[in-house]
Image: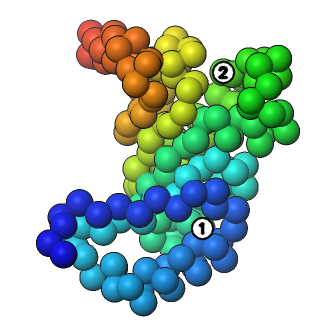
């Protein structure tokens, strides 16, 4: 239809078979013929930590790390329960998983984006995200100003250290 910026984002990807199936549907719909078409997956299920190289080999061009679901699934904790969910925001295990995903995406030559509430709750992690090479950060509107300031400070710090 003349669009020049078409990106499909598959949510809750658990296995290689799911990506292969989606690609078959993409082929049938002839979306792959659109020059700008990109296939991305959400990286929120812990299996992505182990399967990312296979997804990249299949042609996945980027990941959107869903920090809320990734945290919930790593700890089997209900993110809607304030007592449980707040204990795991920016937990070292979550940060290690995000670092692994961003680093591996960079090594594989695919894009990465962090989505969810984590940067808004913990803007102090933004300098780490930038150091790891995150491509984009998506946050709810209520935290956008705080996160934007943290990104600017981290970018300034990174530039001044070079």
Spatial CA distance of label 2 from label 1 is 27 Å
Percent from the top left, x then y, of residue 40?
A: 45, 59
Residue 22 as seen in the image, left or right of residue 28: right
Residue visible at 67% across and 41% down? 69
Kindly identify which numbered label has been placed on residue 54: 1
Position above or below: 17 against 36: below
Locate residue 87 relative to residue 12 in the image: left or right: right
Q: Which mark is residue 96?
A: none
The colour scheme applied to this rendered structure is rainbow
Q: Element type at marker 1?
A: helix
On screen, residue 53 versus residue 46, left or right, reads left
Residue on which disc 2 sits: 90
The reply to whether residue 134 is visible in this rendering is no
Q: Residues within 10 Å of mark 2 (few under 14, many from 20)?
A: some
- Residue 123 position, x and y percent, is 49, 14
Q: Nearer the viewer, residue 161 or 69?
A: 69
Query: Is residue 124 shown above or below 72?
Result: above
Q: Residue at x 64, y 35 (%)?
A: 68
The front one of 41 and 153 is: 41
Residue 33 percent coordinates (x, y)? 27, 82
Q: Is residue 144 left or right of residue 11?
A: left
Q: Residue at x 34, y 85 (%)?
A: 30
- Tell me the quarter of the image containing the C terminus: top left
Up-down relation of residue 71 to residue 26 (above or below): above
């Amino acid at each position: 239809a003349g669009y020049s910026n078409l990106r499909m984002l598959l949510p809750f990807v658990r296995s290689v078979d799911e990506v292969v199936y989606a690609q078959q549907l993409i082929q049938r719909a002839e979306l792959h013929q659109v020059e700008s078409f990109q296939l991305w997956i959400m990286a929120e299920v812990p299996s992505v930590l182990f399967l990312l190289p296979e997804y990249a080999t299949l042609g996945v061009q980027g990941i959107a790390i869903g920090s809320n679901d990734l945290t919930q699934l790593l700890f089997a904790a209900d993110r809607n329960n304030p007592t449980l969910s707040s204990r795991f925001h920016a937990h070292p295990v979550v940060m290690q998983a995000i670092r692994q995903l961003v680093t591996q995406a960079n090594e594989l030559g695919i894009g990465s984006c962090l989505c969810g509430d984590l940067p808004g709750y913990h803007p102090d992690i933004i300098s780490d995200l930038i150091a790891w090479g995150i491509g984009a950060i998506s946050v709810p509107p209520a935290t956008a100003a705080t996160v934007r300031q943290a990104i600017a400070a981290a970018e300034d710090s990174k530039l001044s250290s070079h």
